Each structure stands twice: as structure tokens, then as C-alpha cells.
Image (tube, rainbow, N blue to C red):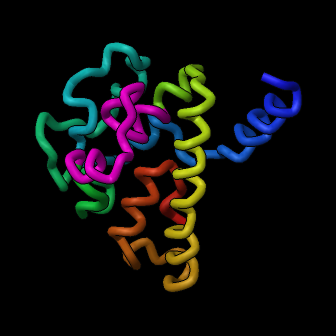
Amino acid sequence: MKSSDNEKSEDFYKLFKPQVSPRKMLEMGVFGGSYFDGKIKEYPKSWFKNAKLSKVFNVEKNFFKVKAGLTRREWLEKGWIFNEDPLGWFQWYCRFKNGRRIPHIDKIQIKRWKAFKRHVTAIKKNCEQGDIHCRRKQRQAILQWAYDPFI
């Protein structure tokens, strides 16, 4: 890789500033508690100490008690699942947080994360500040993308 290409990659990494850690997301309640299908050995045990987990999707495990997002089947159909992370974006984020770097995949996932910010903008535009009951589905969705749902 040329020096200028490497600099562009590093600049791209600087764009990724998640507001919620994987551990905090799991504690708050995301993906109906069933994201990992029980396959959690590669991640720090501390992430799961207070996590809201379920063997099957349980909307009550979500922080806002609503279903937000698409199914894995829909993710696959849309081409959002990659061999490196067969469970999707959150699996990529967890592995990234633990230090794994695959530049071409990282670039795609960071770009997807950045594009999701449009939902943060919509909440800010349509809800009074502090009203966490406004747009609960959208707030659940942004939490699942590591954005602060209490904006």
C-alpha cells in the first residue's frame, strides 16, 4: 500500500466514534437479546455480566421494548453480511473494539455506521430534547448502531 493510501485508511478510522460500547449496548438491551446465538466465548466475559440475553428474540429485552431493524435473512438479501462477520454489523463492531482490523471490511462498516446517523438527525429534528418516548423504534435502532439514544 502506498503511503497516501495508508493515510486515507487512517483518516477513515478517525471517522468512527461510537457513542456506546458493546458492553453498554448489551446491558441496555439490543437485538432482542438473541444476537450471538450463544456464541460469546471470543468476547470479554465482563460484557455479558449484566447483559440482557435471550435464547430467542424477545422484544422485552430491548431497551425501548420495541422491535427495530431487519431480520438476518433480510440483511443477507441486502448484501450486508460478510464472511468475516456472519452475524453482521454488531459482530464486526465487537471484534473491532477488541482490536481486529480488516481495512476493506472496516471501511464498509464504518461507512454504514456513518450513514446511519441520519436517524439521529431525524430524532433531533422531530422530538423535543429529553423526550425518550418520542420515536422509540428509531431510538432502539440507533442504540443498535452504537449511537446514544438519549440525544
Which one is nearer the viewer's eye here, 39 or 102?
102
Q: Magenta part of the protein: which range?
A: 72-93
Q: Is residue 144 magenta?
A: no
Q: As drawn, which residue projects farthest toward the left?
A: 56
Residue at (31, 21) in percent of width and height: 40
- Residue 99, position in %: x, y? 59, 20
Residue at (55, 28) in percent of width and height: 97
The vertical placement of 56 against 149, above or below, is above
Residue at (50, 76) in percent of width and height: 123
- Residue 7, position in %: x, y? 84, 33
Residue at (53, 42) in percent of width and height: 109
Which one is nearer the viewer's eye here, 59 or 70?
70
Give the quarter of the figure containing the C terminus: bottom right
Q: Is residue 76 magenta?
A: yes
Give the quarter of the figure containing the N terminus: top right
The vertical placement of 41 against 102, above or below, is above
The vertical placement of 121 against 107, above or below, is below
Left or right position of 40 against 58:
right
Residue 82: name its quadrant: top left
